[in-house]
Amino acid sequence: MLEILIVWNLAKRIGENAAKKGHKALNYQIVLVGFWILGELTGGIGGMIVTYLMNGDEDFPVIAYIMGLAGAGIGAAIAFLIVKLLTDRSAQPQLSELSPFEPPLPPTQSPYNE
């Protein structure tokens, strides 16, 4: 349950960071949850393998769970790094400001038009 609350708060925070840069928040919230789950699975499986190779069956679930949480934290950190490295779209002109359907400028007088 505590893990769900942590992911919920992190998703709100990463959404705010993405929205400040002019990106859709939901896309990066999904990335965060995906990286969290992938990191937790990878860390848990790695923890099981390391624990089994080191001591057989002793403390099997505890070490695997701790390494799973570490993997989840690393996955979340990678998601936040991706959002931090995004370009800032809020300062860039919008598509409506760059419409290709604006009327052309009137021709200017020059000596080459004669």
Image (spheres, rainbow, N blue to C red):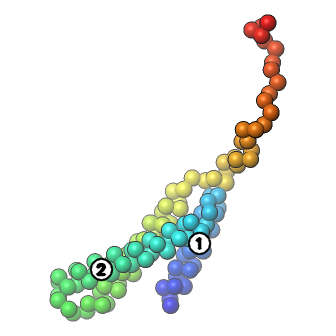
- Is residue 87 something that shows in the picture? yes
Q: Nearer the viewer, mark 1 or mark 2?
A: 2
Residue 108 shows which numbered tag?
none
- According to the picture, the residue beneath numbered tag 1 turns out to be 13
At x 50%, y 89%, the residue is: 2
Which quadrant of the view contains residue 77? bottom left
SS at mark 1 in the image = helix
Task: Answer above or below: position of 111 versus 27.
Answer: above
Q: Amino acid at mark 2?
A: Ile
- Whole-percent x and y of residue 96? 74, 47
At x 23%, y 80%, the residue is: 49
Q: Is residue 55 left or right of residue 81?
A: left
In this rendered view, identify the residue nearer to me: 13 or 48.
48
- Is residue 67 something that shows in the picture? no
Q: Is residue 102 left or right of residue 1?
A: right
Assess disc 1: are there few (<14), some (14-19) or many (≥20) residues with their C-alpha within 10 Å of its C-alpha. Answer: some
- According to the picture, the residue beneath numbered tag 2 turns out to be 45
- Whole-percent x and y of residue 3? 48, 85
Task: Answer above or below: position of 30 versus 20.
Answer: below
- Whole-percent x and y of residue 47? 28, 81
Task: Answer above or below: position of 103 versus 1.
Answer: above
- Whole-percent x and y of residue 114? 79, 6
Q: Amino acid at mark 1?
A: Arg
